[in-house]
Amino acid sequence: MSSKKTMKAIQQAVKEAGFTHEAFAKKIGVGQTMISQWVSGARNPSLSSLKKISEATGRPLSFFIENSGNTQIGNNNIAGSGNNSDTIDILKKYIGKLEAEIKDLKRGKK
């Protein structure tokens, strides 16, 4: 399940950008069902999807990441993993992905 904070952040950004779920889905190239799953909390968007959401809504990527509550990152659940080294490894991997996306954004890649 996705974080309630991420769900609310997506709902807020989509609403404030003036999109219907159908129009937003077309804008970012996903199915309307996927948007519904994200805003209902049934699924957590991938990092690349968050990037598309960020671009389409004009919100910085950090808005969605900071509002994730740090309980989930992609398919990895870091809350209560019981192993600090596992949590650190997951976070390092996530930071690496963010750094790569930042470099791509600076180069003008999508």
Image: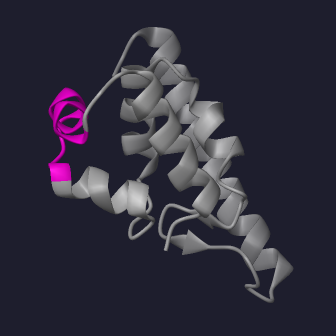
Camera-nearest residue between 47 and 14: 14
Rendered position, 21 above or below 17:
below
Residue found 40% across the figure and 63% down from its top? 40
- Please, what is the dominant secondary structure of the magenta stretch? helix
In the image: residue 110, left or right of residue 102: left
Residue found 45% across the figure and 65% down from its top? 41
- Estimate the x, y position of residue 16 in percent, counting from the top left: 47, 24
- Estimate the x, y position of residue 56 in percent, counting from the top left: 36, 23
Rendered position, 75 above or below 95:
below
Q: Residue furthest bottom?
A: 82
Figure disc tally: 0
Camera-nearest residue between 92 and 39: 39
Q: Is residue 52 magenta?
A: no
Residue found 25% across the figure and 41% down from its top? 21
Residue found 59% across the figure and 41% down from its top? 64
Where, by quadrant of the figure, is residue 53 drawn?
Answer: top left
Q: Is residue 44 something one can see in this rendering?
A: yes
Quadrant location of the C terminus in the rendered image: top left
Please report the bounds of the magenta region as a residue range. 21-32
- Estimate the x, y position of residue 14 in percent, counting from the top left: 40, 33
Colour convention of the picture: one colour
